Amino acid sequence: MYRFLLTPRWLAAAALTVVASVVMVMLGNWQLHRYQERTAINDRIDAANTVDAVALTSVLTAPTAAGTPGAAPGKALAWTKVTLSGRYDPANEIQARGRTVGSKVGFEILTPLLLEDGTAVLVDRGWVPAPPGGALAAPEVPPAPTGQVTVVGQIHLSESRPAPVDRRDGRLDTRRISLPRLATELPFPVYGAYVLLTEQTPAADPAFVPIPIPHEDSWQNGGYAVQWWVFAGMVFVLYGWQARREALESASGKPSGARPARKADRSRDRVEAADQRKASRDRVEEADRRAAASRSATVTADRPESD
């Protein structure tokens, strides 16, 4: 009953079904990996208030030369809670403009923290609102504390798509916090990620608004993973349904070419119907001509003869 599955057409369909299913399973697995990755990031964000901070130098690769940043950490280290100590360098402070917090536009202020080995970490001290003069006017920024400072914060990966860097209001001014671009403007080696400040000793100025950390939408990736796996099963269901349908048609004695034959019959029926309509119009026209000829002969017979 199912011997037709060994024909070239059905063997090709089976191979295509298997390939499509494998691709869909792989896509589902990739979405699962993204779900797990994003869930781990959310866990690190949520655990920041309860876990102990680790030394930044224990999780990030130290930079070796000025002008180029250290190795960028992978996403597995994003938002890790770290601690570090050093002295702020306000002469090379950075203002990132056009940054939004709570629907308001302002500046994020990043100040290099110089470590004992001569390397530096950019510390995002927080957000300040734009002044009344507009986004290009100089913001009011609390000065960085002097002397030895201990910072606790979370690792933030470098932003992509670097923007131009200018000197404005005594600070480096940019739209994007891109470490590869900013490193070229700084006179010391810089780590390949920066730190969002959450605690500081001495205490941070309350004029700074902490930078909110958004959660990743991991459930979307989980839903996509399930969706791809369902599709992978559906292609086999579709293959089985088509095979069952053809097997039933074969068992009922209907030839595989029955459908084209029915199309040919319908085509012939349309031609015959058109011929019949034309013959009917011809008969009507012939009857009209005969009736006209009869009326003409009657009128001629009834006309009186001239003297």
Image (cartoon, rainbow, N blue to C red):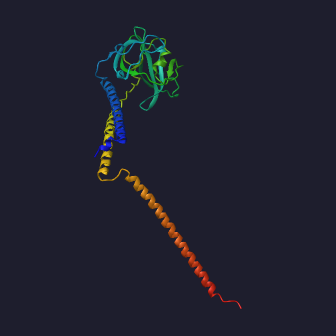
Task: Give left or right: position of 95 versus 238.
Answer: right
Q: Does 175 sit left or right of 44 as displayed? A: right
Q: Nearer the viewer, residue 178 or 227?
A: 227
Q: Position of residue 138 (x, y in %)?
A: 51, 23
Query: What x and y, as percent, mark residue 228?
Result: 34, 36
Tell me the residue at 62%/84% (across/down): 299
In the picture as drawn, the residue positioned furthest to the bottom comes out as 307
Nearest the viewer among 23 and 114 is 23
Vertical position of residue 307 compared to residue 159: above or below: below
Residue 302: image location, x then y, percent: 62, 87
Q: How many marks?
A: 0
Position of residue 31 measured from the top left corner of the image (x, y, whole percent):
35, 31
Res 224 → quadrant:
top left
Residue at (45%, 59%) from the top-left corner? 268
**Residue sticking out furthest to the top:** 117
Q: From where the camera sits, is residue 243 visible?
A: yes
Q: Where 160 sits versus 242, above or below?
A: above
Q: Quadrant of the C terminus?
A: bottom right
